[in-house]
Every structure is written in structure tokens, then in C-alpha cells.
Image: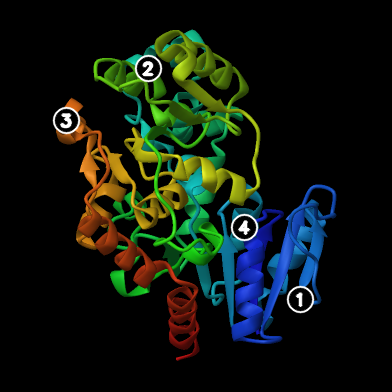
Amino acid sequence: MYLHIIDDSIQINHLIRRTENLFPGKHIFYALSNSGKLDKVVETNNVIAIKSTKNNIIKIAKELSKFEAVFIHNLCYTKSVIILNSSDNIRFIWGVWGFDYYNVYPQLFKNIFLPHTKFVNILLFKHSLFVKYLLHTIHPVSKYIGIKSKDRIKQQAAKKIEFTVNNMPDFSELFQVVDIPRKNRFNGIYYSIEFISKELDASNFTLGNNIYVGNSASNSSNHLDIFLQLKKLNLDNREVVVPLSYGCSRYRVLVNFLGKQIFKDKFKPLLKFLPISDYNQILLGCNVMIFNHKRSQAIGNIIFGIWAGHKVFLRKCNPVYHYLKSLNIEVCSIEEDLLPGNMNTLEDEKQINNCKIITEHYSEKQIQKNYLEIINILGN
């Protein structure tokens, strides 16, 4: 029997469905929440909602030895406490989320902002990452006066983890600071291309002519820097579509204001959550997607864009850029390729090749194969 310790997150539903199809009755999910109730995870016979109280956390830690292995999805503080209070013979597998990068190893992201976004951070007093990095740095001294860094607790817990599961086991920034042998890094992702594309047929649609920028109201998207760069290009009255439905509210307001000032009526912000089918239709109205992140982010949107035939631009310092290049996917760099004459539709042959590669690596069949490999190795 395997245990998964999860949060009340909608993307976990795909994992629950997948594991139950592959290994009926062999995987249990402890879903932690402050209320003990679940809003996003669908409760099934193998899902147990648990209130995140101190007593429950310690109780979970003491019963882990009855499982063959324990999957930790998103290494938050609560799960770190569970790990640190468990016996040393537990086999932990860390399902790495983007959230983990910020909250476990803030030292990785001391340089993820471009110049104009740094100014925006000052203007909006957005210094949370700097504060986390500062607390992490001074923790050896500050802990004696009662100022503690929870990141240090998470990092201690990470040292007890034997395996990781993430999308880029050879390229992730995480392995700059986490000493996990390559043979213990599994390839895995929650969403399949079938789900992301909602069963669209790549041969039966034509892309529009708009430009998609960023993936959320997150300052790591470096919106203002890319807006000013795009302003210098001849966009031929093309619309600039910018998703801002989740993230920091005050950053959203500012990006919305700046976008309207720079692009006028051609600026099209997405301020509300949309059903995935509606969202995909908006993406299909674009033929260029630009992700100005210096860190790995927006993997789902990038995968969909490449599969659908978009010309995708990433920064060369972004690990996702090098990962995609390693798969022989045609992807452009913002630094070298974002030019007036290169904002057109990707050539048909390159679209077909990109779609084929994404389908091979992110189909439901391949994702199931990856999870079967994980369980087989754990069982040996």
C-alpha cells in the first residue's frame, strides 16, 4: 500500500484517477486542509480528508511505517513537520511543484526579475521573496532570538527524501541545491496533453494572429519588460492577450493599467477564470506565445502552445528552454529571436514535428508508463 499526502488542489484529481486505474485499491490519499473538508479534491473511497491540527500531523507521522512508500505532493511546512517526525526507514517520494521552488529554496530566486519589474516590485512593496531569502540567510543567528525561517525546516525535511518526481529531472533548478542522484529522479506530470487540449484535433483548427504573454498575475512573468519590448515592434494591430486571473491582486491592477496605456484597445487581459475549453479557444486565437520568465514556470501553457502549433518564445536562461531544445522542439529565444520579422506563424513542418514530440512525451499513455516505472522501482 502506498500513501500520498496531498493538499486540496484540483490537479490532484488527475493523479487520483490515474493511480486508481493503474493500481486499484493500492494507493491512499491523505488530503490536508485547515477545515478538514475538501472543496477541490473529489472525495472517493481512497481519499481521506484530515484537518491540519498539530495532533493529527504527529499521528500521521507515526503511522507512515505501515506504507511501502509515501508520496509528498508539494513540500509545504506541514508536510515537512510530518517528515521530520517520522522514523528514518520511511521511503519518501517528493512530487515537486512550482510552489516548492519559491517556498523551499528561496536562494534560487534572488535574480528572477528583469530591470523594469524590479522597479514595479519597489513601487508595489513586493518584497516577499527578498524577505524569505533574508530570513533564510540570517537563520543561523536569528533563530536564537526567536526569528525562524520555515524554509530551513522544509530543507531539513527534503534531506530525508529519497526520490523526486517532476517534469524536468535533468534540467530543473531544484537539483542545483538538492542532492538527489539522477537514478532517483523520476519523470512525471499531473496533466496529460489530452486533458490540456480537451481532445482538440490539432489538424482541425487554424490559429489566429494575436499574441499571448505570460501566464498569471505574477511578477516573475516580468510583464512590463516584455510590454516595452513588444511596443518597439510592429504588431500590425494584433491583440495582446495577457492572463491575469490569478496571482497578486495589486500587481494585476498595475499590469492591467500599464497594458492599456501601452497597447490601448489592443490589450486584452483575462481577469477571470475560464473553463478550460473557453480558455483554449482564446489561446487558439493567438499564433505567438511569449513567456518572459527567468525561471521554469507555465509548463502547462507552454506544452499546449507547442502542441497546438504556436511559435513559443522563452528566455534562454529559463531551464524550460533548454529542456525543450533537448527534445528537438522548435522554440525561440526572446533575447535573439524576438524581432519584427519573426512574429509570424511557425512553419507547417515545424508545427507538425512539435505536435508529434509533445504527444509522445505528454500523452496519457506515456504518463501512465512513467508512473508504472516509478512503482516498479519502488517495489524492487
Q: Which residue is located at x 39 percent, y 62 percent?
A: 203
Please name the colour scheme applied to the rendered image: rainbow
- Regarding mark 4 in the picture, which secondary structure is present there? loop
Whether residue 231 sits left or right of residue 223 in the image: it is: left
The mark nearer the N terminus, 3 or 2, is: 2
Mark 1 belongs to which amino acid? Asn
Which of pointers 3 and 2 indicates the residue nearer the eye?
A: 3
Nearer to me, 306 or 100 = 306
- CB atoms at circles 4 and 3 under 8 Å apart? no
Residue marked by disc 4: 11
Instruction: Residue 329: tell me if it is visible.
Output: no
- Regarding mark 1 in the picture, which secondary structure is present there? loop
> Spatial distance from mark 1 to mark 4, Cα to Cα?
16 Å
Residue marked by disc 2: 118
Q: Percent from the top left, x then y, of residue 248?
A: 58, 26
**Which mark, by number, is residue 46?**
1
Mark 2 belongs to which amino acid? Lys
- Regarding mark 3 in the picture, which secondary structure is present there? helix
Total marks drawn?
4
Residue marked by disc 3: 341
The mark nearer the N terminus, 4 or 2, is: 4
Q: Percent from the top left, x then y, of residue 271?
A: 61, 28
The mark nearer the N terminus, 4 or 3, is: 4
Which of pointers 4 and 3 indicates the residue nearer the eye?
A: 3
